[in-house]
Image (spheres, rainbow, N blue to C red):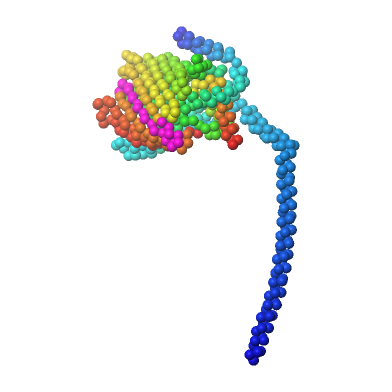
Amino acid sequence: MKNIMKSFTVVGFVLLSLSTNVAASEEKKADSVNGAQVWADTCMRCHNLRAPGDLSKRAWKYSMNHMRVRAGLTGEETRNVLAFILESKTAKDAK
Amino acid sequence: MKRFVIGITLSSVIASTLLGAQNDTIEVKQLRQEVNELKQMMLKLNKSNKESTDYTEKDAVDPFYKSEISELKNTVDEMKRDLESNSKSGFQLAGYASFDWTDAQGADNEFSGVKFAPIFHYQYGQIFQFEGELEFTVQEDGSTETELEYAAGTLFINDYMGLQMGKFLSPLGQYVQNLHPSWINKLPSNPLGFGHDGAAPTSNVGIALRGGLPKVADIRSNYTVFVSNAPTYGIADDGDVVIDASGKTTASDVSKTWGGRFAVNPVSGMEIGISGAIGEAAEEITVGADTLNIARDYDAYGFDAMYNINGFDFKGEYIEQNIGENSDSALEGGKWRTWYAQASYQFTSLKIEPVLRYSDYHNPEQEKNQWAVGINYLFANNVIAKLAYEYNTDEDEDAVSSSANDNRVLAQFAFGF
């Protein structure tokens, strides 16, 4: 009975969260200013900062999703940090 | 006769002078011709240069050319963006590697470790990610040990929740799940009790819900809750009694482990987390000719904190696992606990980073502590050379000759990619 209750709790939790709109959150415009703040607050807690030029734009997209799980970031924070890194990278590459 | 000689001499001089004058006249003519030719060439070159300059200036100021070039640049940029954004799925290889040298008391110095840990990332849009880490290490006999450190897919349900499935690093504490990669760890060795079969659980096979939470009073926070197969308890190959809290694909006839971690970020660069797990551990015993699993009560608790400010970095963590008694077993239960505190400072201009760490480990059979002091040189933020000295103490008075007392010098070259 205890295990059944636990299983129902987990399934209920998942179904409840599934009711939110994933696609809508994807379309929100990223805020690179907030991204810079999250980047400064979060990354160096665990490891040395990686410069935007260390990885390609494509690699940064995957790395940021990896860091979303590792660092406990929200989806919005992840998109914001990515926007900040890509903007920094573009500005530096253009020089 | 004398007049004859003088006459011949004078005639020769006059003749040679006349001939020389004639040669000079020829050379002057040639020179004049060459100068004229050069003048012609100069004129041609000047004309050509002027035409070329006129053409460039004309192009540069012509609005038609300007707009055409600008349009072409935009088209190329758009094509680049499309190329990157149109592919919903993609793959990335990351990871780290390290090479170790050790000189321990009572032993010859040796090249003591080679590790290569590739991490595979696969992503489908913004809704799914798979990540897996393989760890290859060279053993003493030259063979290669391969371990699947983790392999888990995460379905991002919304901005605040991801459902993770598979084998994932233990969410208890911070060191195991975030700080163990050799390019991140600031010393060449793990703190006592944070390796395999130590006091800190290493991984779980199961499912987890995890993510960041909306800010409350401008404070960020994150969480993980999980359910997984149980750890096992027993005697390892080397004779030590251990809790094997690495992920397994069997229920072992005991209750699953339920646990989680909650962390807050009260100020920039700081995280404070608490974690815990409860369930049962499986112990294999032999009754007559039969082998069966019995359940032992199991729980684990953790507390971790880290703070990075102005080049200073402070980390600390406490983890304990407890095993209850079972009268059917010959093994007693007990507490496995460990903690460490670490401080470092990064001189960014010198690329040098001194580190100091204390760790303390206890289990029913062992009690030891360690001071480690080290210095790192950062060739780059992800390419690091480390040199450290470990001062080890076995606190068990009956084990004075234990190798746990041996101090060590360690060096490591590590990089992340």
Displayed quadrant of residue B237: top left
**Quadrant where the image shows the N terminus of chain B:** bottom right
Residue A89 left/right relative to B348: right
Q: Is residue B378 visible?
A: no
The residue at the point 36 percent across, 28 percent down is: B357
Question: Residue B275 location, x and y as percent?
Answer: 42, 17
Say if A67 sits above or below A12 in the image.
below
Q: Is residue B15 visible?
A: yes
Question: Residue B127 location, x and y as percent?
Answer: 58, 21
Q: Which residues are magenta?
A: B345-365
The residue at the point 48 percent across, 9 percent down is: A5
Residue B135 or residue B71, whichever sits in front: B71
Give the dominant element type of the magenta stretch: helix, strand or loop: strand
Number of callouts: 0
* Residue B278 belongs to magenta span: no
The residue at the point 66 percent across, 31 percent down is: B78
* Residue B356 belongs to magenta span: yes
The residue at the point 73 percent across, 45 percent down is: B55
Q: Residue furthest bottom?
A: B1
Displayed quadrant of residue B11: bottom right
Residue B148 or residue B16, whichever sits in front: B16
Residue B225 or residue B246, whichever sits in front: B225
Question: Residue B323 location, x and y as percent?
Answer: 35, 17
Question: Residue B306 location, x and y as percent?
Answer: 42, 24
Say if B254 sits above or below A66 in the image.
above
